[in-house]
Image (tube, rainbow, N blue to C red):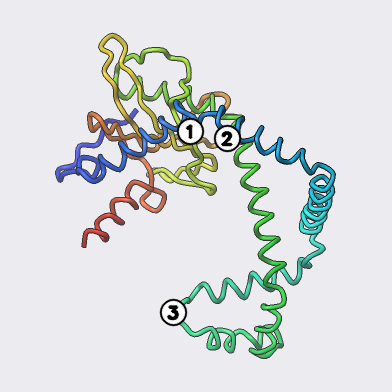
Amino acid sequence: MNNMNQPNKKPFYKKTWFKIIAVLFVLGAIGNIINPPEKESNNTASQTNKNISNSNNQKSEGAESQLSKNEINQESNIKNNKTISDEDYKFYNEIMDHLNADVDRPEEDILEEIAPNYNMTVEEIQNKMRALSDAAVERYSFENQEKRKEKKNFLDENKVYVQTASQNFVEEAEMKKLKGFAPSSSWQVSMYSGEEIKDLDGNSYPYSFRIAGRYEEKGTGNLYDFLMVLAYKTESDIKDVKANCLQYLNTTNGNYYDNIVDEDNDLLKMEEFMQDFDN
Protein backbone atom coordinates (compact mmCIF):
# COMPACT_ATOMS: atom_id res chain seq x y z
CA MET A 1 0.00 0.00 0.00
CA ASN A 2 1.25 3.52 -0.70
CA ASN A 3 2.46 5.60 2.23
CA MET A 4 0.04 7.88 3.98
CA ASN A 5 0.16 11.38 2.52
CA GLN A 6 1.96 13.98 4.63
CA PRO A 7 1.09 17.40 3.10
CA ASN A 8 2.93 20.48 4.30
CA LYS A 9 -0.18 22.59 4.83
CA LYS A 10 -2.81 21.58 7.32
CA PRO A 11 -4.83 18.87 5.53
CA PHE A 12 -8.60 19.26 5.35
CA TYR A 13 -9.23 16.14 7.41
CA LYS A 14 -7.57 17.81 10.43
CA LYS A 15 -9.81 20.85 10.25
CA THR A 16 -12.41 21.02 12.99
CA TRP A 17 -15.42 21.31 10.67
CA PHE A 18 -14.43 18.21 8.73
CA LYS A 19 -13.83 16.10 11.81
CA ILE A 20 -17.24 17.05 13.14
CA ILE A 21 -18.99 16.18 9.85
CA ALA A 22 -17.09 12.93 9.39
CA VAL A 23 -17.57 11.71 12.96
CA LEU A 24 -21.26 12.60 13.00
CA PHE A 25 -21.71 10.78 9.70
CA VAL A 26 -20.00 7.65 10.98
CA LEU A 27 -21.70 7.62 14.36
CA GLY A 28 -25.07 8.29 12.77
CA ALA A 29 -24.61 5.39 10.38
CA ILE A 30 -23.58 3.07 13.21
CA GLY A 31 -26.46 4.20 15.41
CA ASN A 32 -29.04 3.46 12.74
CA ILE A 33 -27.69 -0.04 12.31
CA ILE A 34 -27.09 -0.93 15.97
CA ASN A 35 -30.32 0.62 17.27
CA PRO A 36 -33.00 0.12 14.61
CA PRO A 37 -36.50 1.52 15.27
CA GLU A 38 -38.56 -0.51 17.71
CA LYS A 39 -40.81 -3.00 15.94
CA GLU A 40 -43.17 -3.39 18.89
CA SER A 41 -44.79 0.02 18.49
CA ASN A 42 -45.19 -0.62 14.78
CA ASN A 43 -46.82 -3.96 15.49
CA THR A 44 -49.20 -2.34 17.99
CA ALA A 45 -50.19 0.35 15.52
CA SER A 46 -50.61 -2.28 12.85
CA GLN A 47 -52.89 -4.34 15.08
CA THR A 48 -54.96 -1.27 15.96
CA ASN A 49 -55.36 -0.38 12.30
CA LYS A 50 -56.33 -3.96 11.59
CA ASN A 51 -59.05 -3.91 14.26
CA ILE A 52 -60.49 -0.66 12.93
CA SER A 53 -60.34 -2.05 9.42
CA ASN A 54 -62.26 -5.17 10.38
CA SER A 55 -65.28 -3.12 11.47
CA ASN A 56 -65.91 -2.21 7.86
CA ASN A 57 -64.17 -5.08 6.15
CA GLN A 58 -66.21 -5.57 3.00
CA LYS A 59 -66.18 -1.91 1.99
CA SER A 60 -62.45 -1.60 2.72
CA GLU A 61 -61.54 -4.69 0.75
CA GLY A 62 -63.56 -3.49 -2.22
CA ALA A 63 -61.84 -0.10 -2.24
CA GLU A 64 -58.39 -1.60 -1.74
CA SER A 65 -59.00 -4.12 -4.49
CA GLN A 66 -59.97 -1.40 -6.93
CA LEU A 67 -57.02 0.77 -5.89
CA SER A 68 -54.66 -2.16 -6.24
CA LYS A 69 -55.93 -2.89 -9.75
CA ASN A 70 -55.48 0.75 -10.74
CA GLU A 71 -51.93 0.80 -9.40
CA ILE A 72 -51.05 -2.44 -11.17
CA ASN A 73 -52.51 -1.18 -14.44
CA GLN A 74 -50.66 2.12 -14.13
CA GLU A 75 -47.36 0.38 -13.39
CA SER A 76 -47.91 -2.04 -16.26
CA ASN A 77 -48.63 0.81 -18.65
CA ILE A 78 -45.48 2.64 -17.66
CA LYS A 79 -43.36 -0.51 -17.91
CA ASN A 80 -44.75 -1.26 -21.35
CA ASN A 81 -44.37 2.37 -22.45
CA LYS A 82 -48.11 2.70 -23.17
CA THR A 83 -48.44 6.05 -21.41
CA ILE A 84 -45.75 7.65 -23.60
CA SER A 85 -44.00 6.37 -26.71
CA ASP A 86 -40.23 6.01 -26.89
CA GLU A 87 -40.15 8.72 -29.55
CA ASP A 88 -42.10 11.21 -27.43
CA TYR A 89 -40.08 10.33 -24.34
CA LYS A 90 -36.85 10.97 -26.25
CA PHE A 91 -38.24 14.28 -27.52
CA TYR A 92 -39.24 15.38 -24.03
CA ASN A 93 -35.83 14.52 -22.56
CA GLU A 94 -33.95 16.24 -25.38
CA ILE A 95 -35.88 19.48 -24.89
CA MET A 96 -35.37 19.31 -21.12
CA ASP A 97 -31.63 18.74 -21.63
CA HIS A 98 -31.44 21.87 -23.78
CA LEU A 99 -33.32 23.92 -21.18
CA ASN A 100 -31.30 22.60 -18.23
CA ALA A 101 -27.99 23.15 -20.01
CA ASP A 102 -28.39 26.92 -19.70
CA VAL A 103 -30.85 27.75 -16.94
CA ASP A 104 -29.94 31.44 -17.00
CA ARG A 105 -31.22 31.94 -20.55
CA PRO A 106 -34.94 32.58 -21.17
CA GLU A 107 -36.82 29.46 -22.23
CA GLU A 108 -38.20 31.17 -25.35
CA ASP A 109 -34.69 32.01 -26.59
CA ILE A 110 -33.52 28.43 -26.25
CA LEU A 111 -36.62 26.99 -27.90
CA GLU A 112 -36.42 29.50 -30.74
CA GLU A 113 -32.85 28.39 -31.37
CA ILE A 114 -33.61 24.65 -31.49
CA ALA A 115 -37.13 24.74 -32.98
CA PRO A 116 -35.89 24.41 -36.62
CA ASN A 117 -34.22 21.11 -35.68
CA TYR A 118 -37.69 19.68 -34.98
CA ASN A 119 -39.53 21.48 -37.79
CA MET A 120 -41.74 23.05 -35.14
CA THR A 121 -42.51 26.50 -33.82
CA VAL A 122 -41.76 27.57 -30.27
CA GLU A 123 -45.45 27.45 -29.40
CA GLU A 124 -45.81 23.93 -30.85
CA ILE A 125 -42.89 22.70 -28.76
CA GLN A 126 -44.32 24.27 -25.61
CA ASN A 127 -47.75 22.75 -26.20
CA LYS A 128 -46.30 19.31 -26.85
CA MET A 129 -44.09 19.50 -23.75
CA ARG A 130 -47.10 20.37 -21.60
CA ALA A 131 -49.07 17.47 -23.08
CA LEU A 132 -46.25 14.98 -22.46
CA SER A 133 -45.20 16.26 -19.04
CA ASP A 134 -47.24 13.98 -16.73
CA ALA A 135 -46.55 10.78 -18.68
CA ALA A 136 -42.83 11.58 -19.02
CA VAL A 137 -42.46 12.23 -15.29
CA GLU A 138 -44.29 8.98 -14.47
CA ARG A 139 -42.04 6.97 -16.75
CA TYR A 140 -38.89 8.67 -15.44
CA SER A 141 -39.96 7.97 -11.86
CA PHE A 142 -40.71 4.33 -12.63
CA GLU A 143 -37.41 3.74 -14.43
CA ASN A 144 -35.42 5.31 -11.60
CA GLN A 145 -37.31 3.23 -9.07
CA GLU A 146 -36.29 0.11 -10.99
CA LYS A 147 -32.67 1.28 -11.04
CA ARG A 148 -32.73 1.86 -7.29
CA LYS A 149 -34.07 -1.66 -6.75
CA GLU A 150 -31.32 -3.13 -8.91
CA LYS A 151 -28.67 -1.10 -7.08
CA LYS A 152 -30.00 -2.21 -3.68
CA ASN A 153 -30.03 -5.88 -4.73
CA PHE A 154 -26.48 -5.57 -6.06
CA LEU A 155 -25.35 -3.97 -2.81
CA ASP A 156 -27.04 -6.62 -0.65
CA GLU A 157 -25.39 -9.41 -2.66
CA ASN A 158 -21.87 -7.97 -2.31
CA LYS A 159 -21.91 -6.18 1.05
CA VAL A 160 -20.19 -8.95 3.02
CA TYR A 161 -17.32 -9.17 0.51
CA VAL A 162 -16.79 -5.40 0.64
CA GLN A 163 -16.80 -5.45 4.45
CA THR A 164 -14.13 -8.16 4.47
CA ALA A 165 -11.95 -6.22 2.02
CA SER A 166 -12.30 -3.04 4.08
CA GLN A 167 -11.21 -4.83 7.25
CA ASN A 168 -8.18 -6.23 5.44
CA PHE A 169 -7.18 -2.74 4.38
CA VAL A 170 -7.70 -1.18 7.83
CA GLU A 171 -5.43 -3.78 9.42
CA GLU A 172 -2.79 -3.13 6.76
CA ALA A 173 -3.09 0.66 6.89
CA GLU A 174 -3.04 0.90 10.68
CA MET A 175 -0.65 -2.04 11.19
CA LYS A 176 -2.81 -3.40 13.98
CA LYS A 177 -5.24 -6.23 14.54
CA LEU A 178 -8.93 -5.58 14.94
CA LYS A 179 -10.97 -7.25 17.65
CA GLY A 180 -13.25 -9.69 15.90
CA PHE A 181 -12.24 -10.02 12.26
CA ALA A 182 -15.66 -11.21 11.02
CA PRO A 183 -17.59 -8.52 9.09
CA SER A 184 -19.37 -6.29 11.60
CA SER A 185 -22.89 -4.91 11.30
CA SER A 186 -21.53 -1.59 12.58
CA TRP A 187 -19.66 -1.05 9.31
CA GLN A 188 -21.98 0.66 6.86
CA VAL A 189 -21.51 -0.06 3.16
CA SER A 190 -23.12 2.01 0.40
CA MET A 191 -22.58 2.62 -3.31
CA TYR A 192 -20.01 5.35 -3.93
CA SER A 193 -20.72 6.13 -7.57
CA GLY A 194 -23.03 4.86 -10.28
CA GLU A 195 -20.39 5.65 -12.91
CA GLU A 196 -16.77 4.68 -13.48
CA ILE A 197 -14.24 6.42 -11.26
CA LYS A 198 -10.47 6.68 -11.75
CA ASP A 199 -7.34 6.57 -9.64
CA LEU A 200 -4.34 8.87 -10.02
CA ASP A 201 -2.70 6.37 -12.39
CA GLY A 202 -5.61 6.58 -14.81
CA ASN A 203 -7.09 3.16 -14.00
CA SER A 204 -10.90 2.96 -14.29
CA TYR A 205 -13.20 1.20 -11.85
CA PRO A 206 -16.87 0.63 -12.72
CA TYR A 207 -17.72 -0.65 -9.21
CA SER A 208 -17.10 1.49 -6.14
CA PHE A 209 -18.29 1.45 -2.53
CA ARG A 210 -18.19 3.81 0.42
CA ILE A 211 -17.52 2.24 3.81
CA ALA A 212 -17.95 4.06 7.13
CA GLY A 213 -17.64 2.63 10.59
CA ARG A 214 -15.86 2.19 13.89
CA TYR A 215 -13.40 -0.52 14.84
CA GLU A 216 -11.89 -1.67 18.11
CA GLU A 217 -8.15 -2.30 18.33
CA LYS A 218 -7.33 -5.77 19.61
CA GLY A 219 -5.57 -5.74 22.95
CA THR A 220 -6.07 -2.06 23.79
CA GLY A 221 -9.80 -1.69 23.25
CA ASN A 222 -9.22 1.72 21.63
CA LEU A 223 -11.99 2.83 19.25
CA TYR A 224 -11.38 4.48 15.87
CA ASP A 225 -13.75 5.96 13.28
CA PHE A 226 -12.98 5.80 9.57
CA LEU A 227 -14.22 6.48 6.04
CA MET A 228 -13.07 4.52 3.00
CA VAL A 229 -13.63 4.16 -0.75
CA LEU A 230 -13.01 0.74 -2.29
CA ALA A 231 -13.11 0.20 -6.06
CA TYR A 232 -13.16 -2.86 -8.31
CA LYS A 233 -12.39 -3.42 -11.98
CA THR A 234 -14.73 -6.39 -12.42
CA GLU A 235 -17.76 -7.79 -10.62
CA SER A 236 -15.92 -11.05 -9.96
CA ASP A 237 -13.17 -9.09 -8.16
CA ILE A 238 -15.74 -8.11 -5.52
CA LYS A 239 -16.46 -11.71 -4.55
CA ASP A 240 -12.76 -12.57 -4.81
CA VAL A 241 -12.01 -9.71 -2.36
CA LYS A 242 -9.63 -8.06 -4.86
CA ALA A 243 -10.25 -4.48 -3.78
CA ASN A 244 -8.39 -1.30 -4.62
CA CYS A 245 -8.51 1.33 -1.89
CA LEU A 246 -8.77 4.75 -3.50
CA GLN A 247 -9.29 6.69 -0.30
CA TYR A 248 -8.95 6.09 3.42
CA LEU A 249 -9.48 8.51 6.29
CA ASN A 250 -9.17 7.65 9.97
CA THR A 251 -11.04 10.51 11.61
CA THR A 252 -9.68 9.55 15.05
CA ASN A 253 -5.92 9.50 14.46
CA GLY A 254 -5.79 11.51 11.20
CA ASN A 255 -4.27 8.81 8.98
CA TYR A 256 -5.14 9.64 5.39
CA TYR A 257 -4.54 7.88 2.08
CA ASP A 258 -5.72 9.30 -1.24
CA ASN A 259 -5.44 7.82 -4.74
CA ILE A 260 -8.57 9.18 -6.44
CA VAL A 261 -8.79 11.86 -9.13
CA ASP A 262 -10.18 15.24 -8.08
CA GLU A 263 -13.37 15.05 -10.16
CA ASP A 264 -14.36 11.80 -8.39
CA ASN A 265 -13.21 12.86 -4.92
CA ASP A 266 -16.25 13.47 -2.72
CA LEU A 267 -14.14 14.51 0.29
CA LEU A 268 -12.42 17.16 -1.82
CA LYS A 269 -15.79 18.37 -3.10
CA MET A 270 -16.99 18.61 0.50
CA GLU A 271 -13.94 20.69 1.46
CA GLU A 272 -14.47 23.05 -1.49
CA PHE A 273 -18.14 23.40 -0.62
CA MET A 274 -17.38 24.23 3.01
CA GLN A 275 -14.76 26.78 1.96
CA ASP A 276 -17.27 28.46 -0.34
CA PHE A 277 -19.83 28.33 2.46
CA ASP A 278 -17.41 29.93 4.93
CA ASN A 279 -16.65 32.71 2.45
How packed mark 1 is, by other alpha carbons closer than 10 Å (few <14, some 14-19, many 20 or more), is many
Residue at x 28%, y 35% (from the top left corner): 256
Type of amino acid at the residue the image marks with label 3: Asp
Which numbered disc flags the more N-terminal residue, 3 or 2?
A: 3
Q: With respect to residue 128, does 148 lie above or below?
A: above
Task: Report helix, strand or loop for mark 2.
Answer: helix
Labelled pair 3, 1 in contact (Cβ < 8 Å): no
Task: Report helix, strand or loop for mark 1.
Answer: strand
Quarter of the picture holding the N terminus: top left
Question: What is the number of the mark on residue 155?
Answer: 2
Residue 44 position, x and y percent, is: 60, 31
Which numbered disc flags the more N-terminal residue, 1 or 2?
A: 2
Labelled pair 1, 2 in contact (Cβ < 8 Å): yes
Type of amino acid at the residue the image marks with label 1: Val
Q: Could you give the CA–CA distance between mark 3 and mark 1, rounded to whole angstroms?
A: 38 Å
Find disc 1 in the rendering and name its residue: 189
Residue 126 lies left or right of residue 268; in this view the side is right
Residue 77 position, x and y percent, is: 81, 58
Q: With respect to residue 20, does 94 lie above or below?
A: below
Q: With respect to residue 120, does 236 lie above or below?
A: above
Residue 279 position, x and y percent, is: 21, 62
Camera-nearest residue between 197 and 158: 158
Residue at x 29%, y 25% (from the top left corner): 224
Residue at x 61%, y 30% (from the top left corner): 43
How packed mark 3 is, by other alpha carbons closer than 10 Å (few <14, some 14-19, many 20 or more), is few
Residue 130 lies left or right of residue 11; in this view the side is right
How packed mark 2 is, by other alpha carbons closer than 10 Å (few <14, some 14-19, many 20 or more), is some
Find disc 3 in the rendering and name its residue: 104
